[in-house]
């Protein structure tokens, strides 16, 4: 299976402190991969490195091309990003929901060109898929945390990129909308897209195709979510405080 994203001997530091250590990882194309691990494992740092948002040692490749060598506009078309908790979005409070989602189309637009019919159609699809279409004329600052998160997801979806990277995308979402999010991810994969998500919700992470288990800045395991070895690695990294069970044909992680 071909790799959509590949890390080769990747190191990274934050504030001079090493966080990632010689990571080798290949993310399969057309699949949903979740990254899990205890706090401080380096999950978000790894995702930001894969997105090209952090300096690092080693190499990151996007569809077998060096990420560093790709023009910014090409990279922005092929890979979209949803950051943790909408960090850095407070300055967008006065933007209307529709206009914020339209920002996802910028990589497809010429400088100062008005939105095309394709742009408008992509934004409507994205807002409808996150049940945010009815708020399109409301300022972002008037929304609750969960509503805001759904709009930010819509912006990422509007890019219609081949690869979607998300850091804790379920923050502030209630259980029904978490379920909607999972169905959206499944629909993207069915279209041939690649999804990479950092999740604290272990049962939701187990709904992915593959799981990357991290601790102390290293990848301890990378395997299919249905494999027993993946379940053992997940239980071990959380010191056997969770157990993986099969319930209604789904794998879930429960406290012991």
Image (tube, grey):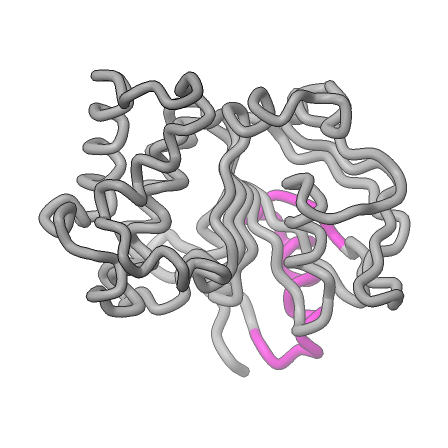
Q: Seen in the image, is 120 located left or right of residue 237?
A: left
- Seen in the picture, residue 189 relative to 108 is either above or below; the reply is below
Q: Is residue 245 magenta?
A: no
The answer to whether residue 245 is seen in the rendering is: no
31 or 235: nearer the viewer: 31
* Residue furthest out toward the front: 112
Q: Where is residue 28 in the image (x, y as percent from the top left)?
A: 62, 30
Residue sitting at 36 percent across and 47 percent down? 153
- Seen in the picture, residue 149 relative to 38 is either above or below; the reply is above
Q: Seen in the image, is 105 located left or right of residue 211?
A: left
Q: Seen in the image, is 31 located left or right of residue 69?
A: left
Give the tally of numbered discs: 0
* Residue furthest out toward the left: 134
- Seen in the picture, residue 230 relative to 108 is either above or below; the reply is below
Residue sitting at 23 percent across and 48 percent down? 97
Q: Residue 72's image quarter?
A: top right
247 or 253: nearer the viewer: 253
Residue sitting at 50 percent across and 49 percent down? 166
Q: Seen in the image, is 24 located left or right of residue 180?
A: right
Q: Residue 250's image quarter?
A: bottom left
Residue sitting at 54 percent across and 31 percent down? 79
Q: Position of residue 2 (x, y in %)?
A: 66, 21
The magenta segment: 221-242
- The quarter of the image holding the N terminus is top right
Q: Position of residue 49 (x, y in %)?
A: 71, 46
Q: Is residue 240 magenta?
A: yes
The answer to whether residue 228 is seen in the rendering is: yes
Q: Residue 53's image quarter?
A: top right
- The quarter of the image holding the C terminus is bottom right
Q: Where is residue 127 in the image (x, y as percent from the top left)?
A: 22, 41
């Amino acid at each position: 299976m071909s790799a959509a994203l590949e890390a080769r001997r990747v190191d990274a530091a934050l504030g001079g402190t090493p966080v990632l250590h010689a990571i080798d990882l290949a993310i399969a194309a057309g699949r949903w991969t979740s990254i899990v691990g205890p706090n401080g494992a380096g999950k978000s740092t790894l995702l930001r490195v894969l997105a090209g948002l952090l300096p690092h040692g080693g190499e990151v490749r996007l569809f077998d091309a060096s990420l560093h060598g790709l023009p910014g506009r090409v990279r922005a078309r092929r890979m979209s990003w949803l950051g943790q908790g909408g960090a850095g979005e407070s300055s967008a409070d006065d933007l209307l929901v529709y206009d914020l989602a339209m920002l996802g189309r910028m990589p497809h637009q010429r400088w100062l060109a008005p939105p095309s019919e394709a742009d408008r159609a992509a934004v409507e699809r994205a807002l409808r898929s996150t049940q945010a279409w009815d708020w399109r004329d409301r300022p972002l600052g008037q929304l609750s945390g969960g509503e805001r998160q759904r709009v930010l997801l819509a912006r990422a979806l509007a890019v219609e990129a081949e690869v979607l990277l998300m850091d804790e995308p379920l923050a502030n979402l209630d259980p029904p909308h978490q379920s909607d999010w999972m169905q959206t991810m499944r629909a993207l994969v069915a279209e041939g897209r690649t999804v990479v998500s950092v999740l604290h919700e272990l049962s939701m992470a187990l709904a992915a195709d593959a799981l990357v288990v991290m601790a102390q800045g290293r990848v301890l395991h990378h395997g299919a979510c249905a494999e027993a070895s993946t379940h053992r690695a997940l239980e071990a990294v959380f010191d056997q405080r969770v157990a993986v069970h099969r319930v209604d044909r789904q794998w879930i992680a429960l406290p012991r």
